[in-house]
Structures are given as C-alpha cells and as structure tokens.
Amino acid sequence: MALPNKVLPGFSATLYCQPTATPTPLTTANLSVYASVSPIVITGNLIPVEAIPAFGQDDAVANFNVAGSRQSDKIPTQSAPTSMTITAAWNPADTNLLLIRGDAYSGTVDRTFVISASDGTGIVNYAFNGRVGQFTVDPNPTAEAKCTFTIHPRGNQYGWSNNA
Amino acid sequence: MKLSEAIELLTSTYQSLDAVALGLPVDAKEVADALAKADPDSAEYVALQALAKVNPYENTKKEKVKKDDDYNQE
C-alpha cells in the first residue's frame, strides 16, 4: 500500500488525539514514523469533529524594495503553524472532548494529534504536537449543543507518514 | 561525536531536526552507510535523514577508465 494517489474528499480526514490526561507527546522524529503514529489512530482516540479545518503553515513575508527594479521582492519570514479552530457536537461525557476541555483549562498540556486521511487502502497521517488554547460550549436552544476549541500546534513538531 | 549519540539526541528532541542536526558533527560516510541499512519506518531513519542533509556524502572514488575500450581499435 502506498500514499493515496487521488484527490481525496474532505470527509475522508479524521482527527485523533493521544489519550490520558498527562500524555507524553511523540518526539519530532517519531512524528514522521508510521509505526509510532498509528497506535494513536484508533477509534477510542477519535475526536467527534464536524469537519477538519485547514492546517499547515501561516504566511508571513518581508517586502523589499529594490532601487531601479520594476518589481519589489517578497521574502518569506518566520511564521507559525496554522492554529485550528474546530467545532464538535457537545457530548458532556465524551472522553476525548473532556481531555480537550482539560487541556484548555490547563494551557500547558502538550499532546500529539493526528489527522489521518485515507482512500480506503492507502493512509496518510499528519501528526503534530499542540496545546489547546480555547474551549467554549454553545448551548443554542435552536440547534444541538456545540463546542468549539482551538489547537495551537507547536513549532517544528510535525511529521508526515504513510502506510507504504 | 559518535553517530549513535547523535541519533539518540535527534530521536529524543522536540526541536527542529534540521536545526539540531546542524550542531552535531558526525562523519558523512558513517551517516550514509547507516542510512542505507536503516529501517525506513523508524525514528533512527528520520534522524539519519536529517544528519545526511547537513552532512552530504559523495563517493570520490572513480572507476578506472579502460584505455582499450575507446582507443586502439582498428
């Protein structure tokens, strides 16, 4: 099996989190190792999110004006990994949502998260370490209760792996 | 620095592997040999890849050209 070699639908990606209230996140090297990441990708660690938001690297550039040149020059500068604001249906007894809520109250818990995408046979995992910075519950009476949380990935702590 | 020490450091760090590897003086040939033998789905392999990026190894030995291959043919 190899990397999924097709354009994947958005719903093929799922989010998993490392279990327990005091996890030891994977080291940078292990975030790129499928054998290290795949034990996290199990049903018990699934976070019941509605959709996986955009993830990756934020943009930041410095604009340089070069005398005599028609065009200026934009050079990418240091930027943060993209923060992920996620909405999930609020089940007060969901173990993983309770972990996320606990992380938000703490603000100092580093946890490994995995976004796993599959076309049925090939699996690609994007693993990263992050902290939860926000957790709110919206008990709107006109719809089911939702909770929203934001994961801030730690800089440089990410890795891609696949089941090839 | 011993290669095993460098690998241990890289597999246990939470920092950027490229940045850490820059500060680890190791033998490029040793890295290349170890990388060839390493399991691609292991933390050691990832660490060796980071080391190989900053310690590229080029085999400088060239095969002797046989003179009679292109010359002395009637």
Image: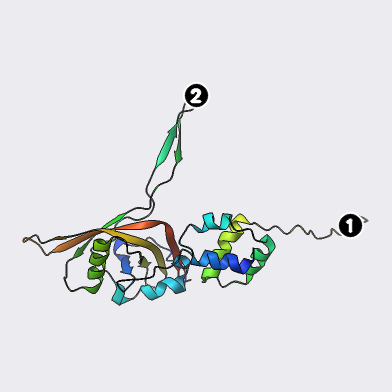
The answer to which of A124 and B45 lies nearer the viewer is B45
Q: Position of residue A31 (x, y in %)?
A: 44, 66
Q: Position of residue A1 (x, y in %)?
A: 46, 73
Residue identified by numbered label 1: B67
Determine whether, in the image, residue B68 is placed left or right of residue A111: right
Q: Amino acid at mark 2?
A: Ala
The chain letter under disc 2 is A
Determine whether, in the image, residue A65 is placed left or right of residue B47: left
What is the secondary structure assignment of the residue under circle 2? loop
Q: Residue furthest left?
A: A141
Q: Position of residue B16 (x, y in %)?
A: 48, 57
Q: Position of residue A37 (x, y in %)?
A: 42, 71
Residue B35 in sight in this render: no
Determine whether, in the image, residue B44 is placed left or right of residue A5: right
Quarter occupied by residue A90: bottom left
Residue identified by numbered label 2: A67
Q: Residue furthest top?
A: A68
The type of colouring in the image is rainbow
